[in-house]
Image (cartoon, rainbow, N blue to C red):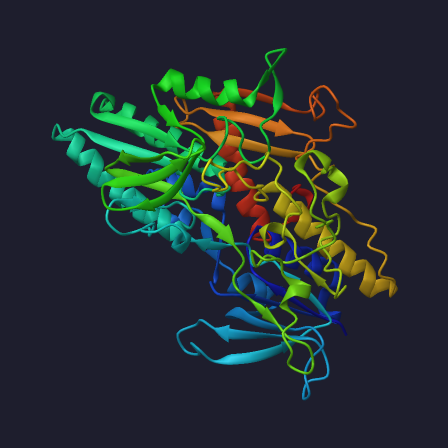
Amino acid sequence: MAKIVVLGAGVAGHTAASYLQRNLGKEHQITVVSPSVNYQWIPSNIWVGVGRMMADDIKFDLRPLYKKWKIEFLQAKAINFYPEGDAILQEGYVEVEYTSSEKSGVRQKIPYDFLINATGPKLNFAATEGLLPGTGNIASVCTFSHATEAWQLLQEKIKKMEQGEKQVFVIGTGNPTATCQGAAFEYILNVDFEIKRRGLDALADVIWITNEYELGDFGMGGAFIKKGGFVTNTKLFAESYFVERNITWIKRAGVKKIDEHKIYYENLEGEYLEQKYDFAMLIPGFSGHGFKAYDKRGSDISEQLFAANGLMKVDADYTPKPFEEWSINDWPQTYQNPSFPNIFAPGIAFAPPHSISKPMKSKNGTPIFATAPRTGMPSGVMGKVTAENIIAWIKTGNPQMVHKASMGKMGAACIVSAGYGMTKGTAATMTVSPVVPDWDRFPDWGRDINFTMGEPGLAGHWLKWAMHYMFLYKAKGKPFWWLIPE
């Protein structure tokens, strides 16, 4: 009997656990460790943040499903990794600390034959001074609870505008090297939609602030896309959305500090500037969770498992090299740790080998650029591939890692909501292939232009709506869930 431990129950972790259960059944022990009992469909947080959905519409309790599937579930968080075991326990284990109310703070050793680290990122709000959601005029949509608070704060600002008081809304990235620009982009478009729907746009200044060199970078160096039979780029695509809606923008900005009424940022010119606001939703920086790893003698071996940012090292090429020399071959394919082959890190938990967007520094030496996105569809694909390789290893005894999912070969689809409603909703449907540009194969565009496209419209909103229910159906393990692609 093999023991498989999955840390995290988000898109990557829950996907991996689902496929492991379906293909291994009761013969092997699957344990999922997560500090929360809830699975949440994160892409719909933006709708919770504008009051179009409630938190219960985008989440569900995992425990009944895992009980049905005979998966052991522990409401706990990982603390330390012991891939060689220790003097007492002669097998690899992970030390966890319970977060449930009845066992809070209790630690336990969980042995494993295979370990999947799908813990995702630490939402590193502390990396930006004053950036604490739920305080003052600062909001977040990174979790369903944050999004609920964001809607409460947004309602307060809407009420002030209804009373004739002008409000400034600043939405974007809250750290010089933040990622996840797409979520903030969706949120600003939906906030603007709700303001205009109420006829309050004359009383609102809506401002986008971003660390992107150009709008539409999205942490993937932007893209050339086919739209309406013509080739354009995501810079014009994003700018046109803002111009049409009278949204202004501040780009190449690294937010350093925020107080109750001002955002303080540095730009690439090395200038230190300020922006007043009444409502701010800024995506924080992401980092690892600060895990430590030890060998069987108790010596710290964290550098074998984790990069400097705390994210896990996998089968990527981390050799330092100039940006122009990087290639898709640097990117991981199996998400397997090179020092301990039975440990994997799909999704945001893995350390990218380099930025997809060109790294930039201000004249003061501050890095200001968008880091690589790994959320949504790519995370699901990585989780599935990780499960498939472990399943094959267990069934054949052969660790060949035949299933692969490099972001340099993987395509991705994204639907950017720009307003909610059966007849008045709109969204931009975008696909890119591959996620990481391959300038050797596609010297003109960096990607396959036949599969890299973008189209706005009501149909995209219907599709995003359908995907909300479809992926929750899949996550809940409903009949034939595995037929729904990642």
97 above or below 455? Answer: below
Split into 4 quadrants, where in the image is the N terminus? bottom right
Q: Nearer the viewer, residue 265 or 195?
A: 265
Indicate the position of residue 183 as horizontal and vertical percent values: 46, 38
Instruction: Please name the residue shown 38% across and 30% down the image.
Output: 208
Q: In the current view of this chain or complex, which residue is farthest to the front?
A: 364
396 above or below 184? Answer: below
- Does residue 70 appear in the picture of this structure? no
Q: In this image, 179 relative to 381: left or right?
A: left
Q: In the current view of this chain or complex, which residue is farthest to the bottom?
A: 88
- The image quarter containing residue 113 is bottom right
- Does residue 245 appear in the picture of this structure? yes
- The image quarter containing residue 29 is bottom right
Instruction: Please name the residue shown 53% across and 46% down the image.
Output: 472
Q: Nearer the viewer, residue 72 or 252?
A: 252
- The image quarter containing residue 5 is bottom right
Indicate the position of residue 478 as horizontal and vertical percent values: 59, 51
Q: In the current view of this chain or complex, which residue is farthest to the top?
A: 229
Q: In this image, 265 relative to 227: left or right?
A: left
Q: Nearer the viewer, residue 150 or 87?
A: 87
Indicate the position of residue 42 as horizontal and vertical percent values: 48, 46
Instruction: Please name the residue shown 77% across and 63% down the image.
Output: 341
268 above or below 300? Answer: above
Indicate the position of residue 486 as horizontal and vertical percent values: 65, 43
Give the total number of marks visible in the rendering: 0
